[in-house]
Amino acid sequence: MIELVDTNSSGIAAEFLRARTRAGSPAMGMVMTLVIVVNEDQAEHAMSAAQAASHEHPARVLGVILGSARGAAQVNAQVGIGSGWTGETALIRLQGEVVKHPESVVLPLLLPDSPVAVWWPCHPPDDPAADPLGRLAQRRITDAAAASRARTKAIRQQCAAYTKGNTDLAWTRITPWRALLAAALDQQPLKVTGASVTAERISPSADLLAAWLADRLKVDVARSSSEGPGITEVVLETREGPIRITRTDGKLATFSSPNRPDRPVALKRRDLPELLAEELRRLDEDDVYAETARALVKRESRS
């Protein structure tokens, strides 16, 4: 990694070119630009997750740390390629007046004619699409579960501000749950009369899962609390008996359904790189998430 002190977008772009030339690869097979808006404490963890995800999605990864807006404008950066990265990477620290206009630094560094994704690993903005960096992206990824404040309201705020291209890793976390529940009703097409979701008291994923079930099945869905970890049980009530998925250790679930023996199902809680890689696989609108976001807002307004 090359340290650049008191630099600018042109200096960072020039260093990218020099790094590619030194590596003997002036052209890189990068498919997108991933912008990570993160604080200093979370920067290393977020960049490590992006590095792992980049093995599936070669990208120019721009980590942006927004410092204090006081004082003279300054841009410092660490730039490089290789060292486990499949594309280019820059960790950019902004200070002073430029913190109020981070897009002025990031915009010249976006890969031409390729999609842009912005990820907020920590507390997301209330309206990602209206954020200065969010406006540059086709895909805006938040994580309500990692919000540093107002965690209970974080997923509600993200759903209320939903715009095409928005998504949240709380939704990504329930992909295996949704697949298993859909498969259960495919195998036994029973009429569901009610449902319940049990999880930690503050669990954006559980709130989304409950809203998804209510929207898809048109039934009342109860939301209960447990010690966790994460979601611990989902029950679909039918006249023939309950369809139940129970996971108490965050790794292995027990699946039970009417007139069939219980069976174990792998349902491990996934790590951050897996979640990020899944979200980067699609850059079009997630229609199901959009409908679920609207359903959650209505559900919360009624309660």
Image: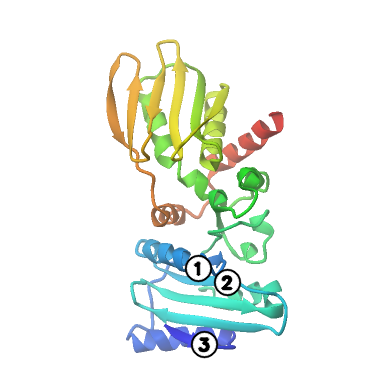
Mark 2 residue element? strand
Is 96 placed above or below 286 here?
below
Residue drawn where x is 45% and y is 57% of the image: 280
Q: Earlier in the sequence, mark 2 or mark 1?
A: 1
Q: Name the foreground residue: 199 vs 85.
A: 199
Q: Earlier in the sequence, mark 3 or mark 1?
A: 3
Q: Quadrant of the C terminus?
A: top right
Q: Name the foreground residue: 47 vs 297.
A: 47
Q: Quadrant of the N terminus?
A: bottom left
Dots 2 and 1: beta carbons under 8 Å? yes
Colour mode?
rainbow
Task: Please give left or right for residue 183 compared with residue 286 in the image.
Answer: left
Amino acid at dot 1: Ala
Task: Please give left or right for residue 280 compared with residue 109 in the image.
Answer: left
Dots 2 and 3: beta carbons under 8 Å? no
Mark 3 residue element? strand
Mark 1 residue element? helix
Spatial separation of the CA atoms under disc 2 and disc 1: 8 Å
Badge number at residue 65: 2
x and y, in percent, of residue 188 in the image: 36, 20
Residue situated furthest front in the rendering: 227
Determine which residue is flagged by label 3: 4
Q: Earlier in the sequence, mark 2 or mark 3?
A: 3
x and y, in percent, of residue 123 in the image: 60, 57
Q: Name the foreground residue: 143 vs 54.
A: 143
x and y, in percent, of residue 229 in the image: 43, 40
Spatial separation of the CA atoms under disc 2 and disc 3: 15 Å
Is 174 placed above or below 86 here?
above
Badge number at residue 159: none
Amino acid at dot 2: Ile
Determine which residue is flagged by label 1: 43
Residue drawn where x is 27% and y is 26% of the image: 263
